[in-house]
Amino acid sequence: MATLAPIRRSPPHMTAQASTWPRTARILDADGAYLSDVDALGLPRDGRLLLGAVGEPAALLDQCFGRGDRRVMLDLDDAPLTGWLETRWEGGHRVWWIELDE
């Protein structure tokens, strides 16, 4: 003989924090001085983090070409990442990315 028991369902809950992209981050020089706000376009792929909108492109250009120091820190949700700032002119606009340290 089978017995019937009620099924109790708990309310839905998140098991992992949802992330939306792009996310705003801050780029700092190797000494921790603020350079610019940027949009991180997604999770790093192949050691490279692509950047979208850059708040202060002149500051990043000065960092790369004026100071000749491409070493930067990226403050993304209070999780600092370090790497090398890279850029190139592509299709009528400037593309930015950071080659992350391992």
Image: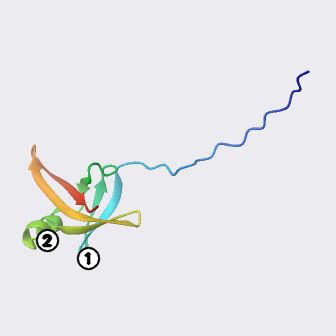
Image quadrant in which the C terminus is located: bottom left
Residue position marked by numbered label 1 in the rendering:
33
Going 65% across and 42% down the picture, which residue do you hit?
Answer: 12
Point out residue 45 in the picture as x, y percentages from the top left corner.
Answer: 29, 48
**Label 2 neighbour load within 10 Å: few <14, some 14-19, many 20+:** some
In the rendered image, the residue lying farthest to the right is 1
Mark before the other along the chain sequence, 1 or 2: 1
Going 16% across and 58% down the picture, which residue do you hit?
Answer: 86
In the rendered image, the residue lying farthest to the top is 1
**Label 1 neighbour load within 10 Å: few <14, some 14-19, many 20+:** few
Does dot 2 land on a helix, a strand or a loop? loop
Residue 70 vs 16, above or below: the answer is below
Point out residue 11 in the picture as x, y percentages from the top left corner.
Answer: 69, 43
Q: Amino acid at mark 1?
A: Ala
Q: Amino acid at mark 2?
A: Asp
Task: Estimate the spatial distance between the alpha carbons at disc 1 and disc 2, rounded to whole Å.
Answer: 13 Å
Given this view, does label 1 or label 2 mark the residue nearer the observer?
2
Q: Which image quadrant is residue 53 in?
A: bottom left
Q: Which image quadrant is residue 3 in?
A: top right
Point out residue 64 in the picture as x, y percentages from the top left corner.
Answer: 12, 66
Q: Is residue 88 toward the left or the right of residue 38 in the image?
A: left
Residue position marked by numbered label 2 in the rendering:
69
Residue 85 vs 11, above or below: the answer is below
Point out residue 21 in the picture as x, y percentages from the top left corner.
Answer: 37, 48
Going 79% across and 33% down the picture, which residue do you hit?
Answer: 7
Image quadrant in which the N terminus is located: top right
